[in-house]
Image: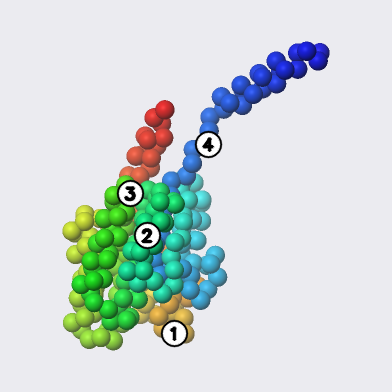
Amino acid sequence: MIRFLPVFVLIIGIAYSTLPAAKPSATILVVGDSLSAAYGIDQQQGWVFLLQQHMLQKKLDYQVVNASISGDTTLNALNRLPAVLERHQPEIVILELGANDGLRGLSLTEMKKNLSQLIVMCQKNNAQVLLTGIHILPNYGVRYTEAFHNVYPELAKTHNISLVPSFLKSVGDNSDLMQADGLHPNAKAQGILLQNVLPYLQPLLKKTDKQYTRAKSIP
């Protein structure tokens, strides 16, 4: 019996080696600021965490990585994006940025340039991009506010990418859904934020799923 043991072990080893490897999840990367970093609330209440729960409930093979940092401007994000892309190699990138540029009254020309570079960087990394439009408070006058809002559809058209027209729709103007600072959505608002994103994300999921499945089937 002892002399047959190595053969038995070899057979078991071959059997395990021929089992199909589990298909790794495709990655959705969220690059944003405090609006996506669950500022002021529990991380598991934030809309990005709810997005991952949505994927699990719908049995969609995506992992959601939240690379959002409170206080980030478009320039901050631009400086850190290369390392984030290299680490996670996402199939889809959701860009939720610009609010801090607007709150600080920074140059819209620079903001637009930074967002454009962020988009191009993602595309060169073979990721689809979903840009979220932000509406800011009219603290800096009608001209600045309108010009700020227009940056997002202009970029979406230029780069032929998907756009969430208003990320804070039904939230930003409702005090019951905002924290005491009047700037950050509270826990009750997070599900609405997710619903604002999903209709524009779902077509990318279908497109990515076809490409991803086909690529993974190639030996």
Q: Amino acid at mark 4?
A: Ala
Task: Report the mark closest to the observer, 3 or 4.
Answer: 3
Separation of marks 1 and 2 at Cα, in angstroms: 29 Å
User: Which mark sits nearer the N-terminus, 4 or 2?
Assistant: 4
Separation of marks 1 and 3 at Cα, in angstroms: 37 Å
Number of labels in the image equals 4
Separation of marks 4 and 2 at Cα, in angstroms: 29 Å
For numbered disc 1, what is the local secondary structure?
loop
User: Which mark sits nearer the N-terminus, 3 or 4?
Assistant: 4
**Residue drawn where x is 41% and y is 74% of the image:** 71
For numbered disc 2, what is the local secondary structure?
helix
From this viewpoint, is residue 165 visible? no
**How is the structure coloured here?**
rainbow
Please provide percent x and percent y for residue 159: 21, 56
User: Which mark sits nearer the N-terminus, 3 or 2?
Assistant: 2
The residue under label 1 is: 181
The residue under label 4 is: 22
Please provide percent x and percent y for residue 158: 18, 58
Task: Report the mark closest to the observer, 1 or 3.
Answer: 3
Give 148 or 162, whichever is nearer the viewer: 148
| Image marks 1 and 3: residues in contact by CB distance under 8 Å | no
26 sits left or right of 104 in the view: right
102 sits left or right of 34 in the view: left
Q: Amino acid at mark 3?
A: Asn
Quarter assignment of residue 120: bottom left
The residue under label 3 is: 125
Q: Amino acid at mark 1?
A: Asp
Query: Does 19 sit above or below residue 49?
Result: above
Separation of marks 3 and 2 at Cα, in angstroms: 11 Å
Q: Residues within 10 Å of mark 2 (few under 14, many from 20)?
A: some
The residue under label 2 is: 81
